[in-house]
Image (spheres, helix red, strand yellow):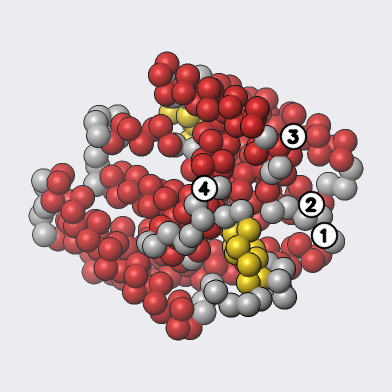
Amino acid sequence: MPADVKYVGGVFENQKVTKARNLGYDFITGFFILQMILLHVLQFAGEDLTRKPYSYLIYVFFYMPWYFYKSGTFFRERGVKETLAKDFRKLILPLFFFSLFGLCVEAAIRLAEGEFTLRWLILSNGMNFLRSGCIHANGALWFLTVLFLVKNLYNAIRSETVRWIAFAVSPLLAYVLHRFSVNWPLDLGACVLGFFYYACGVRMRNLQFRPSVFAAAVACYAVFCRMGISAIDVNRNALLSGDYILAFVNALAGIVVFCNLARFIRRPVPFFGTIGRDSMVFYAAHWPFLLVARYLVAACGITDPVAAVTLYVGVEAVALPCVYALNKRFGWV
């Protein structure tokens, strides 16, 4: 280990740069990225997520709340222009780059199928972005748009009182939007949910490690696992199972449990750590390759669900490491 680097409580701290790499967060991020890709694979393959063994994924279906929460734990109040510039570089530029990548992939597929139209290219994608914060060709990127809005809104609110009020009101507002099926423009329901979990990360970044809080989280999470999981699809602000309000408690309990367990990770974890450390690449690039796999499934006439899932996984397993290597070489994101 270099002389200017010391190991403290699960992270490596560079004494010169004062930056730290949270190894536990890298592991959790890598785990959740793989879970997200698997869920999208199963959805593209037309699998029923309510049947076993896929139904067990619901027990850790708080990965989107966790990403907002994690971002909140790193919040530092900055100037509005400084935050906008920084988040534009870290979130909006990858959004643009990987949206363009997805658009090229889907355009090529549509040209091969004879379904390419200017109406699809301009109107359909434009309307989808205004409604959901992403285009059809890379439907996973709504998170970047929502996180950009959430982070800059929270930073722009300078009154701590107003922040507390917005934090307290956001679950109720999300519930109202859910009841009336309002989730536009720009994934409005997801923005409200994201704001709540982001604010939770800000408020609980130190509180979550208190033994009493950890014990309460373990107890709550155990009760939900035994009695039934409550979960919300953040993207659609739709209830997946259980009770809408209890889903907030369920997600926070799971998040706190995972964050505490992550503190026991004291060395970089191969594979999961790599994906977590470069999560933007794996997250933002996987969707266009699902489109490629879907085209191959249709072209090959594959109807067996197991064979279809295998092909989807195979395409992702080959393509994503290539994108990762190219990004290391050229530094896109």
How packed is label 4: few (under 14 Cα within 10 Å), some, or many (20 or more)? Answer: few
How far is the residue under mark 1 from the one under mark 4? 32 Å
Dot placed on the residue nearer the N-terminal end, 4 or 3 = 3
Dot placed on the residue nearer the N-terminal end, 3 or 2 = 2
Do callouts 1 and 4 mark residues in contact (Cβ within 8 Å)? no
Q: Please tell me whether mark 2 sits on a helix, a strand or a loop.
A: helix
Q: Please tell me whether mark 4 sits on a helix, a strand or a loop.
A: loop
Q: Amino acid at mark 1?
A: Arg
Q: Amino acid at mark 2?
A: Asn
Q: Is residue 97 above or below residue 298?
A: below
Q: Position of residue 200 (x, y in %)?
A: 68, 38
| Badge nearest the viewer, 1 or 4 | 4
Dot placed on the residue nearer the N-terminal end, 2 or 4 = 2
Q: What residue is shown with label 3? A: 167
Do callouts 1 and 2 mark residues in contact (Cβ within 8 Å)? yes
Quadrant for the C terminus in the image: bottom right
Q: Is residue 243 above or below residue 163?
A: above
Do callouts 3 and 2 mark residues in contact (Cβ within 8 Å)? no
Q: Residue 78's mark? A: 1
Dot placed on the residue nearer the N-terminal end, 1 or 3 = 1
How far is the residue under mark 1 from the one under mark 3? 19 Å
Dot placed on the residue nearer the N-terminal end, 1 or 2 = 1
Question: Which residue is painted at 15% across and 46% down in the image?
Answer: 306
When asked about the image quadrant of residue 30, the answer is bottom left
How packed is label 1: few (under 14 Cα within 10 Å), some, or many (20 or more)? Answer: few
Q: Please tell me whether mark 1 sits on a helix, a strand or a loop.
A: loop
Q: What residue is shown with label 2? A: 155
Q: Nearer the viewer, residue 74 or 232?
A: 74
Q: Position of residue 188 (x, y in %)?
A: 62, 41
Question: Which residue is painted at 81% across and 39% down in the image?
Answer: 163
Q: Position of residue 285 (x, y in %)?
A: 41, 64
